[in-house]
Image: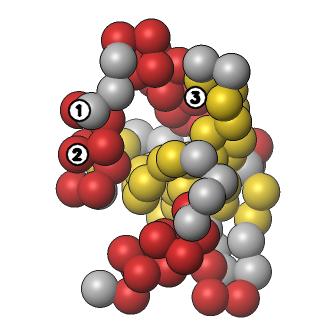
């Protein structure tokens, strides 16, 4: 169990969040708070996405995936979205 002291949003994450409606932002914020309190809650990925965790939550009757990584005491929020092309886009972002 790691005590998280800092949260860093990727530029992609911040840009996506600006496009959401108020209720979707509340759902996303609840998911981030949950991850903040229990960082081991997400599914650990393997292969190309090794060390990345993905947490799944519901927003507007749709399942949303949120990719994050905990390094030391910092929570890095990479991206979120529906399952369609999620992992492909995440790999592309992480390679840059």
Disc on the earlier residue, 2 or 3: 2
Circle 2 sits in a helix, a strand or a loop, which is it? helix
| Image quadrant where one finds the C terminus | bottom left
Residue 18: assigned label = 1
Q: Residue at 66% of width from left, 30% of height from top?
A: 62
Q: Position of residue 41 (x, y in %)?
A: 75, 43
Nearest the camera: 46 or 20? 20
Tell me, yes or no, whether the two marked residues, 2 and 1, touch with CB atoms within 8 Å. yes
Q: Determine the image quadrant of residue 93.
A: bottom left
CA distance separating discs 2 and 3: 17 Å
Nearest the camera: 78 or 37? 78
Farthest front residue?
Answer: 84
Q: Is residue 83 above or below residue 63?
A: below
Q: Residue at 59% of width from left, 47% of height from top?
A: 82
What crowding class fits label 1: few (fewer than 14 Cα within 10 Å), some (14-19), or many (20 or more)? few
What crowding class fits label 3: few (fewer than 14 Cα within 10 Å), some (14-19), or many (20 or more)? some
Residue 15: assigned label = 2
Q: Determine the image quadrant of residue 60.
A: top right
CA distance separating discs 1 and 3: 16 Å
């Amino acid at each position: 169990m790691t005590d998280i002291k800092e949260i860093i949003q990727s530029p992609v994450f911040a840009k996506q969040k600006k496009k959401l409606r108020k209720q979707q932002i509340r759902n996303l914020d609840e998911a981030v708070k949950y991850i903040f309190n229990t960082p081991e809650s997400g599914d650990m990925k393997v292969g190309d996405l090794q060390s990345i965790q993905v947490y799944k939550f519901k927003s507007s009757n749709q399942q949303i995936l949120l990719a994050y990584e905990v390094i030391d005491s910092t929570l890095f929020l990479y991206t979120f979205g529906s399952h369609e092309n999620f992992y492909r886009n995440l790999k592309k972002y992480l390679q840059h």
